[in-house]
Amino acid sequence: MLSAGLPQGTVPRLERPGPLRERVYEALLELITTRALQPGQHLVESELAGHLGVSRQPVREALQRLNTEGWVDLRPAQGAFVHEPTEEEADQLLSVRTLLEAEAARLAAANAGSAGITALEELCDKGERAVAADDVDLAVATNAAFHAKVMELAGNVVLAELAGQVDRRVRWYYTPVARQRGEQSWIEHRELIAAISARDERRATEVMRAHTEHTRRTYHERES
């Protein structure tokens, strides 16, 4: 049941006024991305509406939009279900991520200043603390923030826009392997910071490519 998959406090009621349709969509997308709503889980409009404190109409509209974007499957006579990504879908997405982030790392090595490097180090500190505390949600969020910062330091708007289109799905695929990647992921982040700090574009590219490939491989090797 839906309620079994959403621990108390996971879904705050949405406050009015505001663009309710958009906020319901964002709330549901975040629940899917963080896997509070699991792949294959049945999504009942009335239950979602109750959790979010809204009517069924904006929930229905959000589910239709999520279906169009590939996050939700609408099955005739059965209802809505969180999409279950295939191995091929994940592989294609994570392969594209590798291309984008390797280039971002190269550009960051060419362009980053001391303030940017300090910001990366602070995020790495935070991520390592999250891993030590076994706080998977914080580790995933901090990992996303770290990669977003590298993308920002790259200074290429078009590259950032392309990365933004895949960011949510990267988080979706990373969440189930975050604990498995654990400390090693942040060791690799430290190696990347060292390369960026040294302005070694080739090394930064190599480290980021290997880092994202490790995540892709771990996803495919994960326990069911």
Image (cartoon, helix red, strand yellow):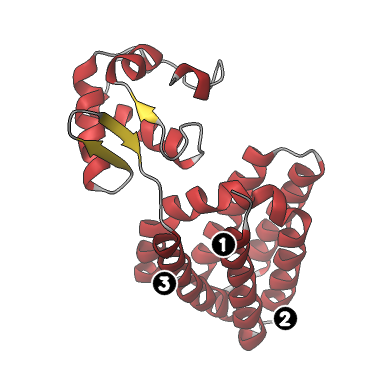
Q: Is residue 15 visible?
A: no
Which amino acid lies under the numbered mark 2 shown in the image of this protein? Ala
- Residue 121 falls left or right of residue 19: right
Residue drawn 62% across the image and 88% down it: 202
Disc 1 or 3, which lies upstream in sequence? 3
Mark nearer the viewer, 2 or 1: 1
Would you name the residue on which mark 2 appears?
Answer: 198
Which image quadrant for residue 1? Answer: top left
Q: Nearer the viewer, residue 144 or 79?
A: 79
Would you name the residue on which mark 1 appears?
Answer: 220
Would you name the residue on which mark 3 appears?
Answer: 156
Q: Position of residue 13 (x, y in %)?
A: 41, 15
Which amino acid lies under the numbered mark 1 shown in the image of this protein? His
Which image quadrant for residue 120? Answer: bottom right
Q: What label does residue 13 carry, if any?
A: none
Secondary structure under the numbered disc 1 in the rendered image: helix
